[in-house]
Structure formats: structure tokens, C-alpha cells
Amino acid sequence: MSHAIWAEGLVKRFGSTTALAGVDLAVRPGTVFGLLGPNGAGKTTAVRVLATLLHPDAGHARVQGFDVVRQAHQVRQLIGLTGQYASVDETLTGVENLVMIGRLLDLSRPDARSRARQLLAEFHLTDAADRAAKTYSGGMRRRLDLAASLVGRPQVLFLDEPTTGLDPRSRNELWELVRGLVATGVTVLLTTQYLEEADQLADELAVVDHGQVIAGGTPEELKAKTGAQVLAVRPTDPTQLPIVLAALRELSGHEPALAQTTVTVSTADPELLPAVVRRLDDAGVQVGELALRSSSLDEVFLSLTGHRAEPSGAGPETTTGQRPSAGSGPQPTATAMGGTKS
């Protein structure tokens, strides 16, 4: 089997809204494939189609060789899904949540309890196993949610913006868990708005905007597509920022960006760095930081879409490509699907 996930020409409409406008994907087994895009791009809709939760209006898709429409039962036996919201039962303990999933997947009670204890240990939740999930922190709930999606030992795991709302420490812990899963041969399709997350985890990426894949490749290949590097300058004295801005604007011919006390500008000119050094030295500017680096995924995204990715606090996308309205609460998700009978 050449691809764990394959899709061609996927189209999905919700009334007058086209969430997917002909999406093609090809995901190699045992890798992390990232779907990168802003809210409303179509990422969640694509995951729901591939996870058999939605029927496409056009196109075809296969998971582990099985058609997601005609062979949905076989697909569900092979996959796990963790949605944008942790969907554990807060009144149950950690072990009770996982045992319930195991029983739904036809495991015997002893096997379900054994699998639950194993996963709780792997996800560093043993000490909280007998506590109600409502007492868990956000990061702990996320780990429990991911553990629930693995009760059925899926071959393919869909992670739909799994670190939304997590603090940096919890996010890093979840990244390590994902790397560990992939090391065992699990294929992961990850949707994310976090450019750093895509850069850290994904072997390959597809950039999605307005329901279409607009670019694809490894993170390094996408960065190379901008054809430029980034020059970053931070003066020791912040009052000299206007001088730095003016120098980079004139010497590069582009409008520089200012983030806090650092000025950046894209360039493909190898002579820009020494020219900037000379100009700032002549102007008496003392430099605290001067670096020429490769483009970041954020800059790639900007060059591809004309806008930066959503800020990290942005809300999740719904299947219609819109954010949930205030007070709408968590959207329905299927957390653990491996081995289901439906």
C-alpha cells in the first residue's frame, strides 16, 4: 500500500458555502502529515470526510486502501479521532472513561481495564486515574482524550487542532506523545493553525485556504518556495528603531516589519547584510542582534495567502468553515473510532 490516506478532488458544500473545493491529499504510512490553514480553510471538514463522519459531494478518498464512503465500516475499524475539544465524560474517572471506550469496542471487561491502565501509564496519568475528569487540568484532559482515541489501537490517527488552548508545556508534552506514536508506525494527520507545531511535527504539509490546497511539500521545501531569507535587526537602544526601519526599507526596497524591538525584512540579495552593517555603523546604531535566517512557515504562509495565519488564541473552525457562535458550546466529535461496529 503506497499511501495510508489518499484523496482526490474532495468537494463538500454546506448550503451556499463550499468548505472543500477539490482537495487532493497523499499521506505516506508512518508519517505526520500536517494540514495548515486559518479558520474556515476547510481543515476540519476534510478530517470529517476522511473519518467517515461526512459524505463528500464529489471526489474520492481512501484510508488504508478502503473507500471512506463505500467501505466506511472498515475505515472506522482502523482509525482514531481526536477533535478540537476534549470530549471525555467529566463525571467519570480517567480509568472509567477509557474502560467505557474499550467496552464500546467489544473488549472484555478485564481487557478494557488492562488497556486503560496501560494507556494511563503511557500518558502519565496513573496518579489521576481514579479522579473524576472534571478535576483534570486542560493538558491532562487533552492527554486523556488522545488516550481514548488509541484504545482500539488505530493504524491512522486524525488530530484536529489537538493543542488548541494548551499552555506551552502541555503542548510540548503532546508533541512528544505524537512523535512516540509515529515511531510505532501510526500514521497521523494533524490539522493546526500553529505554524511552529507544523514545523516541529510534520514530515509533509499541505497549506489549505478557501477549501483548496494551495501548496504542499516538506516544511523546508515550503520555506524554500519564498526564494528569500529574512534579515533580523534589533538595536540595543529601542529609540533607534526608526533609523533601523529606514535603513532596511531603503537598502532592501521592501517594507520591513516591526515586532516588539526587532525589525525584519525578506531578501534574496546576499549583499544586503554587509550593506546594513555599514549603514548602521555610520549612523552610530549599536546592534544587539543581527541575523540572516531562512524564512519561517509564518512568512511562507503570508507569501502564499496574502495574510498571516490566525493568532494562537483564535477559535476553532466548524464544518461549515465558520467559528461557533457565542454560547454554542462544544461541537459533537467522535473521539475513539477504532473497531466500532457502525
Image: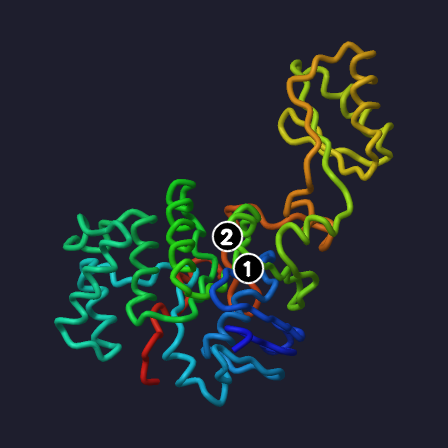
Q: Quadrant of the C terminus?
A: bottom left
Disc 1 crowd, CA 10 A, few/some/many (<14, 14-19, 20+): many
Give the secondary structure at mark 1. Answer: strand
Give the secondary structure at mark 2. Answer: helix
Which image quadrant is residue 95 in?
bottom left
Question: Is residue 258 positioned above or below 27 on the image?
Answer: above
Q: Amino acid at mark 1?
A: Gly
Question: Is residue 250 positioned above or below 111 on the image?
Answer: above
The Cα–Cα distance between marks 1 and 2, rounded to whole angstroms, is 8 Å
| Marks 1 & 2, CB-CB < 8 Å contact | yes
Q: Is residue 1 left or right of residue 149?
A: right
Residue 199 on image: x %, y %: 56, 49
Residue 43 on image: x %, y %: 56, 65
Q: Is residue 276 left or right of residue 300?
A: right
Give the residue drawn at x 43%, y 41%.
Answer: 168
Q: Amino acid at mark 2?
A: Leu
Residue 193 on image: x %, y %: 55, 53
Q: Residue extending furthest bottom?
A: 70
Q: Nearer the viewer, residue 151 or 164?
A: 151
Give the residue drawn at x 74%, y 13%.
Answer: 285
Q: Nearer the viewer, residue 164 or 282?
A: 282
Give the residue drawn at x 28%, y 53%.
Answer: 123
Q: Is residue 85 left or right of residue 220?
A: left
Q: Nearer the viewer, residue 77 or 179?
A: 179
Sequence-wise, the earlier of marks 1 and 2 is 1
Residue 214 image label: none
Disc 2: which residue: 201
Q: Nearer the viewer, residue 63 or 248?
A: 63
Disc 1: which residue: 34
Q: Residue extending furthest top?
A: 284
Residue 86 on image: x %, y %: 35, 59
Give the residue drawn at x 20%, y 76%.
Answer: 107
